[in-house]
Structure formats: C-alpha cells, structure tokens
Image (spheres, helix red, strand yellow):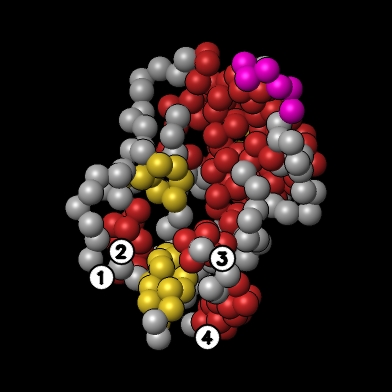
Amino acid sequence: GSRAQRKQRQAEESLRPYIGRVEPEKLCELLKCHSPVGSWCQVVRENGVLIPKCVCPQSCPRQRAPVCSVLGRTYGNECLLHKEACRKRRRTGLAHTGPCLVPKAKCTEEELSQFPYRLLDWFLLLSRMGESYAPAAPPQNCLSHAQRTQLAQQRFTILDKNKDGKLSRRDLRKLRYKRMPLEHCATPFFQSCDRNRNRKVTLQEWTTCLVDRSEAWFYHFMSVRMGSRKLCPTIKENVL
C-alpha cells in the first residue's frame, strides 16, 4: 500500500547520502524492506552506480545455503525464501541460517535450559518485522535486562487476548511455538513456568521464565565458557 511505499522511500532516502562513500553491501544490511511485500535488499546498478534496493527475486541461484524462516520452513537459500514471500505477498523473516531443526521426541535438560533464550530470540525477530524495527538494532545477546523484560511484556500483551493478565493454554496455542526450533521443549517449558500448577501463566511467571532463565543460560553456556561474564561489551538502552 501507499504507506509501505512511503516508508520504503524514506528508508532509501536516509541511505542516499552514503551511496558512493560506503560499500553498497554494507548499506544493504541497514535497509529495511517495506515494499514490495516480501522483498529483500540487493545491490543493483542504476545509472552506472551500485545502490542498495529492495527487490523481489525473479530467479535464484542454485547454490545450497539453507536458511530457516520464522515460520519454521527450510529454504535452499535466502533468495528462495524471499521469492516465495513476494509471490504470497507476505513478510517472512529469516530465523537463522541453516536448516530448521527437526523436532525430537524428548527434550533434554540442556535443551530445556536453552529454550527461553531461543524463544526470546524469536520474539525479537518478530518485533523487528513490524514497525518497531530499527536499523543496526543489536542482537539479543547485546540487550539489557530491561530490554529483555520489555520484549517479554510486549509479547505477553499480544498473546493475552482476553486481557485477564494470565496466559492460558488456549492463549499459548496462538504462539505457534511448534514452528520454531526446539519446539519439543515448549510444553515442558511452559509447564515449568506455571509454578502454582493452575494451568495459567501470570505476567510475573512469564517474565521470570523468559528473561531470568534466558540470561542464566547465556551466562552459563556462552559467557562463562568464553571467559567473560558480560552479555555484550556495549548496550543501547533505547533500541530493540
């Protein structure tokens, strides 16, 4: 629509002063695509100058570089993901490089510890597919505790359809967590969040499960093993 086209023009205009001074591939990393729907940034030549531009792929290379979408589907490469997204006129974000993980029958203790971090990472991707996206936004490991809490609270508000301050199993079904990696850990994870076993998760239980346990996993399995207890050397409080 015209709104998306207007936002696209604004995004492209913001990068125009840097064309010719910064590598176009780098500018592509900063360009958020709003229009056409499903498009992605590619370097194209216009009037003899290489510029970043949001396009819908007409054809894709045959090279194998599997990626996983936020909807849990594996594509041969990122170009194929955006080609289908454009065809269906649907914004489909990239969850991670590599094929989507195949669900397993049993969730191990280590996978259960990792699940809240992966879930928050997915929430962050979903939030950046909307209007709150900011160029050069940091990855989850660079977010502060307050930013993680804000992210968890925002998703709680979205899922709490009847606004009773609690998430039921019916609310959680709308999460579509079965389409994300480690989905076989989803049920035991949410059961562990329900501390009083009333089959509902309060906002406090939700944030404690997601934020505290996400950071605990990161500190233990990432920062400590790498010899640093910091999540990120620099943290921007105002960017999600």
Q: For residue 22, which numbered disc appears in the image?
A: 3
- Crowdedness of circle 2 by 10 Å Cα count: few (<14), some, many (20+)? many
**Considering only order in the chain, which callout, 3 or 1, is on the residue closer to the N terminus?**
3
Going 71% across and 31% down the picture, which residue do you hit? Answer: 231
- Which amino acid lies under the numbered mark 4 shown in the image of this protein? Ser
> In this rendering, does residue 140 appear at all?
yes
Camera-near label (4 vs 3) is 3
Residue 227 included in the magenta stretch of the image: yes
Which residue position holds label 4?
2
In percent of width and height, residue 35 lies at: 47, 75
- The amino acid at mark 1 is Gln
Main secondary structure type of the part rendered in magenta:
loop
Helix, strand or loop under label 4: helix
Towards the viewer: 177 or 38: 38
Amino acid type, residue under disc 3 in the picture: Val
Q: CA distance from mark 4 to mark 3?
A: 29 Å
- Chain part drawn in magenta: 225-230
Q: Which residue is mark 1?
A: 58
In terms of depth relative to the viewer, which is nearer, 207 or 14? 14
In the rendering, which numbered label is found on residue 16?
A: none
The residue that appears at 44% across and 50% down in the rendered structure is 94
Q: Is residue 142 above or below residue 14?
A: above
**First along the sequence among labels 2 and 3:** 3
Q: Upstream in the sequence, badge 2 or badge 1?
A: 1
Q: CA distance from mark 1 to mark 3?
A: 27 Å
Give the number of the mark in front: 1 or 4.
1
